[in-house]
Image: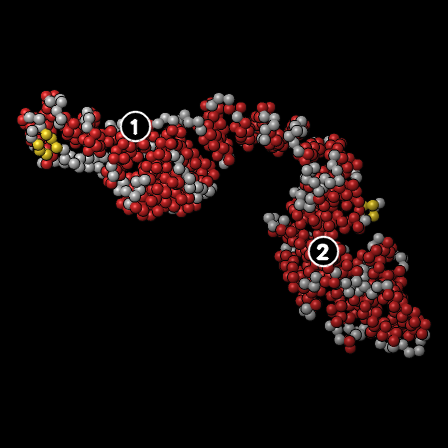
Amino acid sequence: MVKFNIFSSIKTLTFLLIFSFFSLSSNENLEFKAENDDEALFLRRIAEFWQDEEFEIAKSQINSFLEKYPNSNLTDSLYAIYGNININEKNYFEALNAYDNIKSTEIKDKISINLLSSLFHTSQFDRLAHECNIYIEKTSGELKEKISYLQAISFFQIAEKETSEIEKNNIYKNALTKFQLLLETKFEMESREYISQIHLKLKDFNSAANTYLELAQKNPTKEEEYLFQAALLQTNFDKEKALNTFSKITANSLNKKSDAAYNKTLLLFELGKYQDLIREKDFLIDIVQDDKKPLIYFFVGRSQFILKDYSTAKETLINCLEMEDKTCIQMKLALIMLMQCSYQLNDFDLFNNSFDIFISYFPNDEQHFEVLFARALLNKRNDKYELAKNDFEIINQTFENMENKDLYLFEYAHLLYLSNDLEKSKAKFKKFITFNSNHELTKPCINYIVNCSIKDINNSNELNIDDKRKNLIEDINYALEFSNVLSIKEKNSFYLLLSKTFFDLKDYKNSLEKLTFLESSLNDSAIKNIEFLSKNDLAELYLLKGYCLKYLNNNYKEFINLAEKSLEINPDSQDTAITYINLYNSFLNLSKNDDKIDENHLLKAAHNLYKAYKISKEEIDLSNLIWLANYFYTKTQYFINQDYKNNLTDNKILYDDSLKSKNIFEYLISLEENLQEIEKLVNIEPYLVKISNLYKSQNNNPNQLEILNNLISYYKNYPNVSWQFKEEAIYNLALVYESLDDFEKVKNLYNEFLITFNKDSYFKPRAYLHHIRLLLSKINKENYTFQNKALENILAELKTISLQKVFANEPVHLEAAFDYVDTLCYIEKLRPFEKKLFLLTRMKDNFILEEDLPSQDYHAMRRLLEDKEKIYQAYMMMLEAEILICKGYVENRLDPIINAKELLLKMKNESLIITLYLDNRFKNNLKLIEGFKN
């Protein structure tokens, strides 16, 4: 028998598993004992062919040997060699067949790892798990770890194919336990990868992610891959953690940076971190691959869109048009958002471009209607009604049963309303209500139906306007049928509109009836509770009711009561100015009581008209504006003329009235700006004169002087014009010059203009008297003689003025008479009191007797002009006092002096010292009384 070690010179066979860890050659030599020389030769040849790496021949020789010597004691060993050669050639099924023919347990134990490898590679995992279980008990050390690793893998693979979910999870857990036992071996890293996969299979994402994080720490060469897997797993249970992990990868990674950036983008968007995503846009765009860039733009643009930053979103989303897949969902959404952005930004070009692309790439998309509808709404919103109508027509032709879509029908009806196709609009709104009587848009439809008729009225001419108003009444009654939809306040508003429409039809009876019904339906809390009627509507109710009563019954008092109530409720109504004007007219009517003027009502009339002026002066008739300016003007001038001591600065109310008057006169002047110069100047002359008088009353001499000088220039430039107030302006200017001690200008002014004065002018005797007094003041007292012709002329002028008396001109005639007496008496130095008594008595007769027609007219006017009568009585009392003083001096008696003093004190007590002229005479007369010696 030949004995030798056949493997002493044979190369070691190796077998690599999927991770290239296992060396599968046997660690022990197999000894072969040939039964005879033939067997020995066979074995020698097999060994030679093996050594020559002629494995196919070696396998053939082994097969031949086994056929020739089937009962040889070398059979198991040769099957082992045959199996190892096939493993080396990756013929795992043949290797497994060879190993299965081995009957010797000892030999099988020696090639156990090769047997297990064959089972692994032929996916016989159930048997592999069983065989591993056998050999684990027989081995130790590294070989045992290898077999344990194979067994763990086998359980993992068995679980993969298991159909029962419960059993599958149990097997996974078994495999998990097996792998966990290998964490302290050379198979730690591979086991951790399997452990992470098992956690994932068991949906324990947290544990799976943590395992990958541990792998990343233990294997820096694959850190970014493991971190990426961990981040993906973290998205299932903690997106914030996943976001942080992806951020770490994008900051440091090389190979996974692009994918991590894309996933980070998705997470930022999903977490609603829109601002963060927008802030990192450029960084993310820079690191993702080119094919992913449009998607980053998509999510950034969508974030901007969500934040309603439509302008920026538009610019970002335009980049999405570069997507390679033009029909992907992101492309579709990007186009829709672009259209919505352009809708918000009124960017027609962008909308139409996006619309065309959308229709091109998504011609049959379910949102085709929505985008076309959006374009119609965009055109509608921008008043492009014809384009909008065209879009609606396309929708009608393209899609079926569109009028059953409530929003579409409403918008179509509204478009028709805006484009003034009112009848068609009204029909569409009514159709909407027919199909949707309880829809949230039903109420707006009702309102638009009524508004169609209101708009129709506004667009109609006077010939058919009443027919339109009757249509409105029908529509309001139609609206009131939907009481279940309308609130109490809305129904009341419709009732109010109904009454207003009857009012516009001049059917005041029906209007009053509706208003009365509406008023009765309100309780005491109506003013406070807007559920009943708005404050504006309530105010209008009272105002309309007042108008109805005024027009039906001339009931001005009730109109005033209701109109004032209306203004109290709503002082800011758009009709406030008109209301004040009507209050003015009503108070004006009430002020005319039996041909007497009720000053209280007149004052209220003026105040209401001025309120209207402050709100809207343009709505007031010119005649009423002139009346108002003159009313305040007359009030202030009357106050000034009542008593020379009266001063506007001491009376705030009247001072304010003077400002009101001036303001209105200035506005009246502004209305004349567009006229030819002469016509304008003639028209504004009265206003300028009165403004100058107001400045005088306000002690504003510079402004008064400026206006009067302007007027004088007009008179000089246009001497042939019939000026109304020339005499007054000249007289007032002379007074101003006098106050400035510029007597030369007074003299020149009178020399130029006095001869032009109208003989019937109120200011002619005043100006003449003023002129005479100035001339008289320039004559020295020593020249007061009858030989002085200038003085003689002055006396003649004074006499003329006193004789040509007109009651309305007083006190000019009375003062001229007094001045005549004073001047003449000064000349009579020897017997002044006798002369003065004579002249004063003559003066008295001239002013009390009615012997001639002028005197009769003079006294007739006393009954009509109360303010002048007061002046007349004051001057006549002064005249009587002076007569008594003269008598006292002439007769040297005290009684007349005492009576004169009593009379003067009476004048003072009764406030009859009403002019500066009287005051001066009063003081002089008191001196005469005090100087009297009996």
Q: In this view of the protein, which residue sits in the foreground, 8 or 611?
A: 8
Number of residues whose C-alpha sits closer than 10 Å to that of mark 2, classed few (under 14), some (14–19) or many (20 or more): many
> Residue 64, image x and y in percent?
10, 22
Which element is circle 1 on?
A: helix
| Quarter of the image where one finds residue 492 | top right
Which part of the image, by quadrant, shows the C terminus?
Answer: bottom right
Please give the count of numbered marks on the rendered protein. Answer: 2
**Mark 1 and mark 2 in contact (Cβ < 8 Å)?**
no
Q: Which amino acid does label 2 sit on?
A: Asp
> Residue 658, image x and y in percent?
71, 57
Instruction: Specify how the rendered protein is coloured.
Output: secondary structure
Q: In this view of the protein, which residue sits in the foreground, 628 or 776?
A: 628
Q: Which residue lies at the image location 63% right of the left edge and 59% below the top edge? A: 710
Which part of the image, by quadrant, shows the N terminus?
Answer: top left
Q: In this view of the protein, which residue sits in the foreground, 472 or 819?
A: 472
Q: Which residue lies at the image location 78% right of the left edge and 77% below the top edge? A: 782
Q: Which residue lies at the image location 35% right of the left edge and 27% below the top edge? A: 162
Number of residues whose C-alpha sits closer than 10 Å to that of mark 1, classed few (under 14), some (14–19) or many (20 or more): some
Say which label, 2 or 1, has the lower sequence index.
1
Residue 224 showing in the rendered view: no
Q: Relative to 173, is 843 on the left or the right? A: right
Residue 710 showing in the rendered view: yes
Residue 394, placed above or below residue 575? above
Q: Relative to 928, is 167 on the left or the right? A: left
Q: What residue type is labelled 1?
A: Asp
Q: Distance between the residues labelled 2 and 1?
A: 115 Å
Residue placed furthest toward the front: 1
Residue 126 got which mark?
A: 1
> Residue 254, image x and y in percent?
28, 45
Which element is circle 2 on?
A: helix
Which residue is under mark 2? Answer: 657
Q: Which residue lies at the image location 51% right of the left edge and 35% below the top edge? A: 381
